[in-house]
Structures are given as structure tokens and as C-alpha cells.
């Protein structure tokens, strides 16, 4: 691409109208909890600059390798390319992974110490993101992590076939490379432990996540062969010496219903035959796929609602069905059948969903499903003792973040809340007055995008064959090649570019309309601009009614045909970029 789309000039705006333009016209960025510059890094890939793409991701969401694999992708359903008649959404998440796969490099920023110390409890996505942001601001950051390896749910709650350990380690290393210290095997149990930290640190962030299962009480729940979902995953992911520290009785132990020790390890050949997993989220899906890799003969996912209600990405459902996992919807467990104290079956009742979305059991619909293992993956919660003492505390030096503050959420949501907490801590310790969004608006000559790119189909993710998916830790998705990532990146509409027509200079020649490949330029009448800066008009074909020629950026594909065709150079292209500034 060269320099043909480099900025002629840049201005900075704090106008609410320009800020709103980003939310309205860059839907993927607006949908991302951490506001990743998605068009920015995709354009960098399109130009073959994977290192720049990684740097953008590393700045915005801190964990590019992790999130390129396990993000729940709220950006993709709102992608303009996925609208009716336009094809499939861009593979935004897969391209994020490419940035990490091909562009990763150590960060070497110059950091000036502020002489203040911050302690973070929990090395999960919220704690790691907060640590990263605070370290870059010059704070001395120490993370206390109860497990033997950092990462929290990333390391122990997500299987390697979705997220390999070395990927987590690489993203963590990029944060410790900033000077962040992580003390593993260290657990803070109660308020007295927190008070000790208060004497040593200037601020303490509680980001311990939700590591305790939400429980249900049904007959037989304490039988041998019953597991809580997260503990099942921890036992499956733990290596010798790498599991969590044992917890004393009464200290919030996440011991599963079937009395499995926290240090128990599960590996292929554990003897499970028929496994039933109850739940409709990512942990439930991971448990089904892990059970299959532990050589279970038959695996069933049972969920009290419908397939459309499951809180997982569509590709996850495709994966479990492809792997031969059975799905059973609108069923709720009401009891565990046992033989000699071990699970022999699960008793269910069928349900219907009412108009108000409530679940109503259907009388007389009970049935028994044979099973020798039951896994309850119905959600997690924070540890009650510490949560009650500090969760809502606003005075003092304590802050909260991630799942610990908001309840169980996704990785990207936890990371976003970690960033918010870091901003709050920085404001508290530095005496900042606050923050303000600023928009960098750069005038460019062209976008580098061509009309032909619209006809590129969605590039499929390469995967290992089904016969290899019984291998417990083998990653299923193998990633895009550089060539495939370059092709996929061209599909992006680059929505961070704003095309505008200078009405005072326009001669109404209609040359732009003649060359537009999609219906994005209109002759307009009754033009009005509201207080938010949005233009409202009525399209017209009558010359005696025309008040302006307008470009609809929501339909524009950023090909630049109109700019090249305009004889009076009245069409401009501006690139919008969101930054945050501090007010002292």
C-alpha cells in the first residue's frame, strides 16, 4: 500500500458528535467491551504489517494470543459485512490471533517509576490487564495468585485444545516483562489478610474471579461421580505440582459434590463411560469436549433452555456437534440415581418456556438418563467471606474488578473491567481530575480498499481432523496462514474511515453516483442535522428538490471510487481513532 493513504493532517476533537460517530459507524469497536481498534489492526494485516497489528491489539486488549482464541466475539455479530445480502461477518477473532501468531514481539517501553505500590489479588484476565495498565503508568505492581501458574481461568478453566498453556504464558510474559511481579501459590483468605496488605501497599485490587460453583440441591448430589464443572476442568488441566493450593476446611474450598480433591488429576483412561454435563455456557461445553478426550464412550449436554439460549459462540456448538456430543434441551435435573454410592443415572423433567421466558416443568414428563459421571456446570460465584467485606467498599484503598465485582463473565469483559479498575486506581493514587475521550481525525488520500474485496468469501479456520480430537491437549483450531489472513483482512469494510461531501463545493455532476458500486450516495432534500450531529434527509430523484449530495457511511464500502471520480475534489476521507486523555 505504501504511503498512499497516510495522513495529510491530523486534528484532535473532544466533540461529543465526533465521539458518537465512532459508536455509530464502527459497530465492531462499539460492541467490544474493551473498545479494541478492530479496523486499525485488520488494516495493518491487510498491509502485511503483523507487528503493527499485534501492537494495536497489545495496547487495546493486552492478551492478543488468548483473546484470539477464546474471546466470545461480541464484535462479529454486528459486523456490517454480515448483514443481509452482504455475506458473512469478517473473522475478526481469527485475525486477532494472526496478529499474535505472526507479529508478537517483546515490549520495551520507557517507564518512569511513581514510587507507589499496588497489590492485585488474582492473575486472571482482569488482574493481568489491570497490572499491565498500572505498570505502564509507573506503579510497582505485585500480583498474588493462589494457583501455581498465573492465568486463573485461562490456565485452569479452559482446556488446552482451545487455549494452549504456552499461549497463556506468552501473554503473561509480556506483562511481567514490564516489571510486574507474580507470586504464585499465595492465597489471601480473609479480611485479616487484606489488612496486612493495606500496610504494605498504596492500593489493593481484588480480582480473584468467581472460582466457587453455584450449587443446586437435588437428591443424590453428593454421590461419587458427581463433579462441579470448574473443578472438573481444573482437575483435567492440572499437571503434577501445577494444581491449586489445597484449601483448609471452611476457607471457601471449591470441593465438588463428589468429594473430589482439589489436587486430583484427570487423564485419559479414568474409566468414565457415559457422561452427562448440565449447563449452557462455555464451561459446560468445555466439560463435554474434555470428557470426550478423557475417553468417555458417550457424552450428553443437557440444558434447561434451548440451543438459541446457550451463552456460547456459534462455532462452539458446531464443534461439539461435529465431535459427536449429544444435545438435550428443555430438561432440568431433579435427582441422581445411584448404585453402591456411585452415579448410575440422572433423573430429568422436561420443561417449556413461557412468554415471559420463565421455565415451567411439564407434569408427568420425568425420564431417566443412564450415566456414571455427572458434571454440573451451571455457573460460578465469588468467595463469600471476602466478597462481603470488600465488594462494595468505596472508601479505603481497596478496589474490585472482573468477575469478583460483576459475577461470572467472559474473558474480554473481565479484561475490560480490569482496565476500568486500573484507571480508577491511577486516578486515586495520582490525584487526577478525570479522563476524557479524544478523537484523532486524520485526512487521508485513500483507504487502500478495492471493490473486488467485497466478493472474497469468508476464509474457513483450519482444524485438525476429527480422528485426532481424542488427543487431550491437541489444539483443534490451527490458525490462519499468513496468506489466508491477508485474504480475510481484505473483506473488512474499514469502517473507521469517514467519507464526506463538501456541499459548498459540490457541482451536482453526479459523477460519484455513476461510479458507486453500492447504493450509498443519494440526492437529498429536507436535510436536517440534529443536536448529536446526525444528518437526516429524504432521498429524491428530482433536481428541483435537491439540497445536497450525501454519502451514507453505513452503506459505504470505502472503495474510494467516488473520490477518484469527483472533478472538483469535494469528497474527503478522514480516519477516526479513539484515544483517552487525562485531566490533572
Image (tube, grey):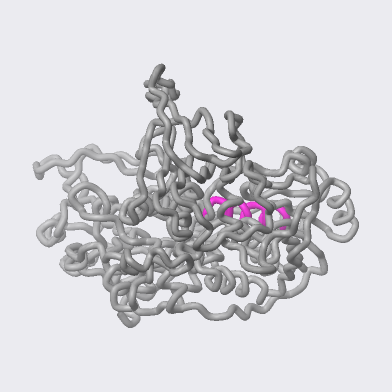
Residue in the foreground of this view, choosing between 577 and 182: 182
Q: Quadrant of the C terminus?
A: bottom right
Give the residue displayed 44% in from the left and 69% down from the top.
474
Give the residue displayed 36% in from the left and 42% down from the top.
327
Residue in the foreground of this view, choosing between 505 and 319: 319
The reply to whether residue 141 is visible in this rendering is no
Give the residue displayed 61% in from the left and 60% down from the top.
265
Residue in the foreground of this view, choosing between 337 and 80: 337
Q: Give the dominant element type of the magenta stretch: helix, strand or loop.
A: helix
Q: Check the image and report above or below for 183 versus 311.
A: below
Give the residue displayed 84% in from the left and 51% down from the top.
194
Residue most extreme to the front: 340
Q: Quadrant of the N terminus?
A: bottom left
Residue 467 percent coordinates (x, y): 33, 66
Image quadrant in which you'd find residue 62: bottom right
Residue in the foreground of this view, choosing between 535 and 470: 470
Query: Residue 23 magenta-drawn?
Result: no
**What residue range appears in magenta?**
412-426
Residue 582 percent coordinates (x, y): 65, 58
Q: Is residue 282 left or right of residue 324?
A: right
Residue 129 percent coordinates (x, y): 62, 61
Q: Is residue 146 left or right of residue 276?
A: right
Give the total of numbered labels.
Answer: 0
Residue most extreme to the bottom: 2
The reply to whether residue 324 is visible in this rendering is yes
Q: Check the image and report above or below for 247 versus 477.
A: above
Residue 206 percent coordinates (x, y): 73, 51
Amino acid at each position: 500500500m505504501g504511503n498512499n493513504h497516510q495522513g495529510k493532517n491530523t486534528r484532535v476533537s473532544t466533540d461529543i458528535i465526533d465521539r458518537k460517530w465512532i459508536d455509530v459507524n464502527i459497530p465492531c469497536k462499539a460492541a467490544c467491551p474493551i473498545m479494541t481498534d478492530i479496523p486499525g489492526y485488520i488494516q495493518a494485516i491487510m498491509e502485511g504489517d503483523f507487528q503493527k497489528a499485534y501492537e494495536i491489539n497489545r495496547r487495546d486488549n493486552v492478551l492478543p494470543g488468548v483473546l484470539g482464541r477464546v474471546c466470545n466475539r461480541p464484535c462479529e455479530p454486528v459486523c456490517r459485512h454480515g448483514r443481509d445480502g452482504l455475506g458473512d461477518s469478517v473473522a475478526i477473532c481469527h485475525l486477532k490471533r494472526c496478529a499474535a501468531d505472526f507479529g508478537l514481539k517483546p515490549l520495551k517501553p520507557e517507564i518512569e517509576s511513581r514510587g507507589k505500590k499496588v497489590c492485585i489479588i488474582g492473575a486472571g484476565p482482569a488482574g493481568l490487564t489491570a497490572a499491565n495498565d498500572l505498570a505502564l503508568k509507573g506503579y510497582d505492581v505485585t500480583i498474588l495468585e493462589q494457583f501455581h501458574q498465573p492465568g486463573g481461568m485461562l490456565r485452569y478453566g479452559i482446556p488446552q485444545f482451545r487455549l494452549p498453556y504456552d499461549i497463556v504464558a506468552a501473554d503473561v510474559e509480556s506483562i511481567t516483562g514490564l516489571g510486574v511481579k507474580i507470586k504464585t501459590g499465595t492465597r489471601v483468605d480473609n479480611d485479616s489478610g487484606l489488612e496486612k496488605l493495606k500496610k504494605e501497599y498504596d492500593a489493593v485490587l481484588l480480582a480473584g474471579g468467581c472460582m466457587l460453583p453455584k450449587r443446586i440441591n437435588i437428591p443424590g448430589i453428593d454421590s461419587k461421580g458427581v463433579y462441579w464443572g470448574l473443578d472438573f476442568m481444573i482437575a483435567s488441566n492440572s499437571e503434577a505440582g501445577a494444581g491449586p493450593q489445597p484449601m483448609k476446611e471452611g476457607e471457601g474450598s471449591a470441593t465438588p459434590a463428589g468429594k473430589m480433591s482439589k489436587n486430583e488429576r484427570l487423564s485419559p483412561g479414568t474409566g468414565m463411560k457415559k457422561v452427562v454435563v448440565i449447563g449452557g455456557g462455555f464451561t459446560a461445553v468445555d466439560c463435554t469436549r474434555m470428557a470426550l478426550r478423557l475417553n468417555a464412550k458417550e457424552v450428553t449436554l443437557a440444558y434447561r433452555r434451548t440451543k438459541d439460549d446457550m451463552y456460547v459462540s456459534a462455532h462452539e456448538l458446531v464443534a461439539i456437534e461435529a465431535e459427536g456430543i449429544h444435545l438435550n434441551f428443555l430438561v432440568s435435573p431433579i435427582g441422581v440415581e445411584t448404585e453402591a454410592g456411585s452415579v448410575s443415572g440422572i433423573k430429568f423433567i422436561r420443561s417449556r418456556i413461557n412468554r415471559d421466558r420463565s421455565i415451567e416443568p411439564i407434569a408427568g414428563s420425568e425420564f431417566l438418563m443412564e450415566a456414571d459421571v455427572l458434571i454440573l456446570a451451571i455457573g460460578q460465584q465469588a468467595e463469600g467471606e471476602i466478597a462481603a467485606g470488600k465488594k462494595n467498599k468505596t472508601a479505603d484503598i481497596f478496589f474490585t474488578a472482573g468477575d469478583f465485582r460483576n459475577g461470572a463473565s467472559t474473558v474480554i469483559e473481565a479484561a475490560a473491567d480490569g482496565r476500568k479498575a486500573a484507571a480508577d486506581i491511577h486516578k486515586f493514587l495520582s490525584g487526577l481530575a478525570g479522563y476524557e475521550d479524544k478523537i484523532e481525525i486524520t485526512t487521508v488520500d485513500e483507504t487502500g480498499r478495492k471493490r473486488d474485496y467485497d466478493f472474497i468469501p469468508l476464509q474457513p479456520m483450519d482444524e485438525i481432523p476429527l480422528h485426532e480430537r481424542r488427543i487431550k491437549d491437541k489444539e483443534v483450531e490451527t490458525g490462519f496462514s499468513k496468506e489466508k489472513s491477508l485474504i480475510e483482512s481484505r473483506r473488512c469494510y474499514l469502517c473507521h474511515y469517514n467519507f464526506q461531501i463538501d456541499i459548498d463545493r459540490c457541482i451536482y455532476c453526479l459523477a460519484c453516483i455513476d461510479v458507486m458500486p453500492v447504493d450509498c450516495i443519494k440526492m437529498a432534500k429536507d436535510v436536517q442535522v440534529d443536536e448529536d450531529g446526525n444528518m437526516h434527509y429524504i432521498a429524491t430523484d428530482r433536481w428541483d428538490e435537491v439540497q445536497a449530495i450525501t454519502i451514507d457511511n453505513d452503506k459505504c464500502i470505502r472503495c474510494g471510487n467516488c473520490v477518484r471520480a469527483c472533478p472538483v475534489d469535494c469528497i474527503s476521507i478522514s480516519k477516526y481513532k479513539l484515544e483517552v486523555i487525562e485531566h490533572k
